[in-house]
Image (cartoon, rainbow, N blue to C red):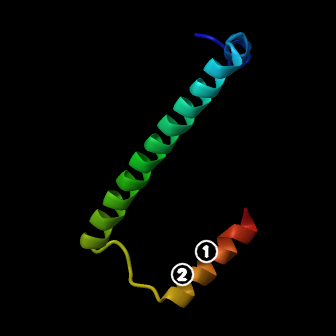
Amino acid sequence: MMTFEQTLDTVMQLPQEQRKILINIVIRRDNEFRRHEIAKEAREAIAEFHAGNLKPQSAKDLISKLRQEQVET
């Protein structure tokens, strides 16, 4: 398996136009992968909700919790 540095070196050997194409392909694939992750997380959350494992929260409480978590990170 190639290291990250070796991969970068290999990519930089490509002509500029091919590098641009490669970058666009990687971005599209990464976006698609993330969409699948989000969909999976949503299905899991819905299942947790239907199983009764999640409690209802007001929008105000949820926003406050999200802001607090954002400050902590």
| Image location of residue 49, percent across then percent down | 31, 72
Which residue in the protein does label 1 denote? 66
Asked if residue 43 is positioned above or below residue 12 in the image, the reply reads below
Tally of numbered discs: 2
Q: Residues within 10 Å of mark 2 (few under 14, many from 20)?
A: few
Residue nearest the viewer, comparing 33 with 23: 23
| Image location of residue 1, percent across then percent down | 58, 10
Residue visible at 74% across and 70% down? 71
| Image quadrant in which you'd find residue 42 | bottom left
Residue 42: mark: none
Q: Secondary structure at mark 1?
A: helix
- Quadrant where the C terminus lies? bottom right
Residue visible at 33% across and 71% down? 53
The residues tagged by marks 1 and 2 sit, at their Cα atoms, a distance apart of: 6 Å
| Image quadrant in which you'd find residue 72 | bottom right
Residue nearest the viewer, comparing 43 with 19: 19
Q: Secondary structure at mark 2?
A: helix
Residue 62: mark: 2
Q: Pick out the residue farthest to the left.
A: 50
Q: Pick out the residue farthest to the front.
A: 17
Asked if residue 38 is positioned above or below residue 56 in the image, the reply reads above
- Verify CB contact (< 8 Å) between mark 1 and mark 2: yes
Amino acid type at circle 1 is Leu
| Image quadrant in which you'd find residue 68 | bottom right
Amino acid type at circle 2 is Leu
Q: Is residue 15 left or right of residue 1?
A: right
Asked if residue 44 is positioned above or below residue 31 in the image, the reply reads below
| Image location of residue 70, percent across then percent down | 69, 68
Q: Is residue 14 left or right of residue 24?
A: right
| Image location of residue 3, percent across then percent down | 67, 15
Q: Residues within 10 Å of mark 1 (few under 14, many from 20)?
A: few
